[in-house]
Amino acid sequence: MRKIIAANWKMNKTRPMAAEFAGQLAMALKEGTPEGRLALVFPPFTDIAAVADAFAGINNLAVGGQNFYPAEKGAFTGEISCAMLRDAGANWLLAGHSERRHVFGETDGLIAQKTAFGLEQGFKVMLCVGETLEERNNNQLNGVLQRQLSSAIQPLANGILSKSPDQIAVAYEPVWAIGTGKVAGPDEIREAHAAARKILSDLLGNSYANSVPLLYGGSVNAKNAGSIIALDNVDGLLVGGASLEAPSFLDILRA
Ligand code: 13P
């Protein structure tokens, strides 16, 4: 399976900053990304068009939206639609990121609605899951993954996901590792990914579940990326802080 190296810029970069980054990436990757790698950038909405323009025509470089509202259009002040994101050049979406869950209070129910809507609109959706430190300390890892994955995926198992098997990816991002510099250890990543894969198999069947890319995110940087991406069952990385500078992101992409 090709490995996905994704940058989540969160609420960082004005348009000129985004254009500079995207230009550096496009220049470095004009012959293509390293073999078997997809580079994916989730910029803030106002930067998407600039990044997509810089990436146009280069293989294996893609752009996504960090958030969206699950309705075609209407009276949803402050929200953004899938059509708007597509028009700006995005073809991936994030759903269930821990900051959406824990800072903005998004529920499993809303995340399930968003996942279904994004897929129906023809986007690839990266569904993020992961436990808090308290949940980990209370031995709730499996239960949290089960709840977060099944609420979003179960309703789609016999519907859209049975028709479009390559539309979904899952990112395991333990909340305690995000932005803390405390990267999960290899055994912790292996254990969580194996648990997530088993849950996906129960929901979707073995062969389908094995084709869903399973990414790790949480304090990934250029130094630790190589050892994490080499782990069994790790099909990619979702990078926050260390994705903000092009040279650092390129090092991670090449790790
Ligand atoms: P950091 O890499 O900054 O820990 O953020 C991870 C993340 O939340 C990516 O979505």
Image (spheres, rainbow, N blue to C red):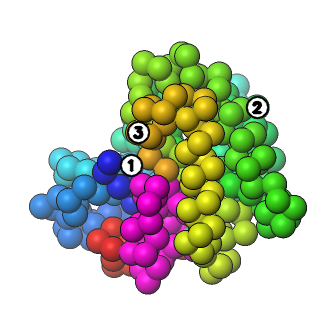
Tag 2: amino acid: Gly
What is the CA distance from the residue labelled 3 to the residue labelled 1? 21 Å
Helix, strand, or loop for circle 1? Answer: strand
The image position of residue 141, as x and y in percent, is: 75, 55
**Residue that label 2 marks:** 109
Nearer to me, 188 or 144? 188
What amino acid is labelled 3 in the image?
Answer: Ser
Q: Is residue 8 visible?
A: no
Query: Is residue 203 toward the left or the right of residue 169 in the image?
Result: right
Nearer to me, 74 or 57:
57
Q: Name the residue under label 3.
A: 211
255 with respect to 127 (left or right): left
Q: What stretch is highlighted in magenta?
A: 215-240
Residue 99 circle label: none
Q: Determine which of the numbered discs, if any, sits on residue 63 in the image.
A: 1
At label 1, the amino acid type is Val
